[in-house]
Amino acid sequence: HVSAAVQQTVARLGSLDIVVNSAGVAAPISLDDLDPATWQETIDVNLSGSFYVAREAARWMMAADGGTIVNVGSELSFRGAALYVAYCASKAGIIGLTKALAAELAPKVTVNAVCPGPIDTPMLHGEFAMFPDPREAYASTVAQVPLKRLATADEVAAAILFLAADVPYATGSLFSLDGGITIG
């Protein structure tokens, strides 16, 4: 499916210059309740999906004039969080994937990652709704961020665009856009 999607994209646009891997799933779930199907779905969407898209895109980019791949990690790529074992593992894998792809695809293709903190999206608000007190979950999350607010989707898009278009010398770089949550 991924190969066909990449082929269709190249046929329609004439080239493939930038790929952004931003698909993700997350849900708070205790270790005892983390069943194999949920674990596998989280790894499949968050990590394997990024791998397969990057691999197919890289094949086209390496045969052409190059390109850039931007993966979306998370602040939880760098730190653990209770109730997010599968998510943390999958997003930590994005860091290894980014660095390994950058090493293998240089100098033609650059590969970097944006690692946002909590983003004000329906997905995050859906996660808050899974807690016994969604308002407390929201307040607790914001309290952990030194800038005392959630990121916006536009801020994440700007960071992705920056890595994709404005810093051609960067590869294997990890851009933390987390309001300072991973400072210490």
Image: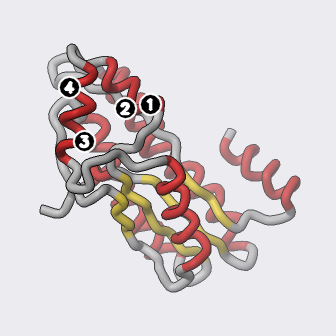
Q: Nearer the viewer, mark 3 or mark 2?
A: 3
Taking the view exactly as shown, the residue that stands out farthest to the top is: 132
Mark 1 sits on what residue? 123
Element carrying mark 4: helix
Q: Residues within 10 Å of mark 1 (few under 14, many from 20)?
A: some
Mark 3 sits on what residue? 142
Q: Amino acid at mark 2?
A: Ala
Q: Residues within 10 Å of mark 4 (few under 14, many from 20)?
A: few
Question: What is the CA distance from the residue labelled 1 to the residue labelled 4?
Answer: 17 Å
Element carrying mark 2: loop
| 1 and 3 marks in contact (CB < 8 Å) | no
Question: Tag 2 or tag 1, which sits nearer the N-term?
Answer: 2
Q: Nearer the viewer, mark 1 or mark 2?
A: 1
Mark 4 sits on what residue? 136
Question: What is the CA distance from the residue labelled 1 to the residue labelled 3?
Answer: 16 Å
* In the depicted structure, whether residue 113 falls above or below residue 72: below
Identified at 22% across, 35% down, the residue is: 85
Q: Amino acid at mark 3?
A: Val
Nearer to me, 40 or 164: 164
Q: Nearer the viewer, mark 1 or mark 3?
A: 3
Question: What is the CA distance from the residue labelled 3 to the residue labelled 4?
Answer: 10 Å
Question: Tag 4 or tag 2, which sits nearer the N-term?
Answer: 2
Q: Amino acid at mark 1?
A: Met
Q: Amino acid at mark 4?
A: Glu
| 1 and 2 marks in contact (CB < 8 Å) | yes
Question: Tag 2 or tag 3, which sits nearer the N-term?
Answer: 2
Q: Which part of the image, by quadrant, shows the N terminus?
A: top right
Question: What is the CA distance from the residue labelled 3 to the residue labelled 2?
Answer: 18 Å
